[in-house]
Amino acid sequence: MSDIYSRIQSELISSGNYKEIYTLLETELRNSGWYDNFIQLTEKTIENTNDKDLQFNKLVSALQDKGIQSVPDDVKIKVIQKIAEFLNTVVE
């Protein structure tokens, strides 16, 4: 299994598909409003947290699940389709 994983990882980076998929995800998140909404959520979370409790790891823990769950379904579908297209060219 690690051989397949290594092959996929190597091909993903060397082919430029990693950057392409990342750029697609970033663009779709910005265009959907997710990015701005997540910034607002982060700012509100920071404002409502005592300074002594404000730690990066705690902030990530508080926001990570909310961020993932709030990604619009159409963005998920587009990115998953792009990943599937890539995998179809690598895995035989």
Image: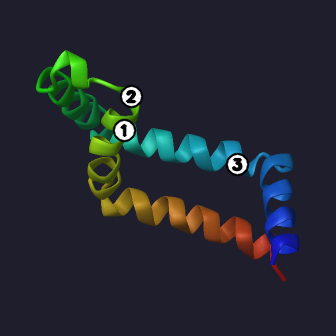
- Density class for disc 1 (Cα within 10 Å; few <14, some 14-19, many ≥20) is few
Q: Mark 3 points at which residue?
A: 18
Pointers 2 and 1 in contact (C-beta within 8 Å): yes
**Number of numbered discs:** 3
Q: Which colour scheme is used?
A: rainbow
Which of the 4 quarters of the picture holds residue 37? top left
7 on left or right of 80: right
Q: Name the residue under label 2.
A: 56
Q: Calculate the distance from the C-alpha at mark 3 to the C-alpha at mark 1.
A: 24 Å
Q: Mark 1 points at which residue?
A: 60
65 on left or right of 44: right
Question: Circle 3 sits in a helix, a strand or a loop, which is it?
Answer: helix
- Density class for disc 2 (Cα within 10 Å; few <14, some 14-19, many ≥20) is few
Quadrant showing the C terminus: bottom right
Which residue shows up at 71% across the image and 65% down it?
A: 86
Asked if 55 appears above or below 80 in the picture, the reply is above
Please tell me which residue lies in front, 45 or 41.
45
Which of the 4 quarters of the picture holds residue 91? bottom right
- Density class for disc 3 (Cα within 10 Å; few <14, some 14-19, many ≥20) is some
Which of the 4 quarters of the picture holds residue 61? top left
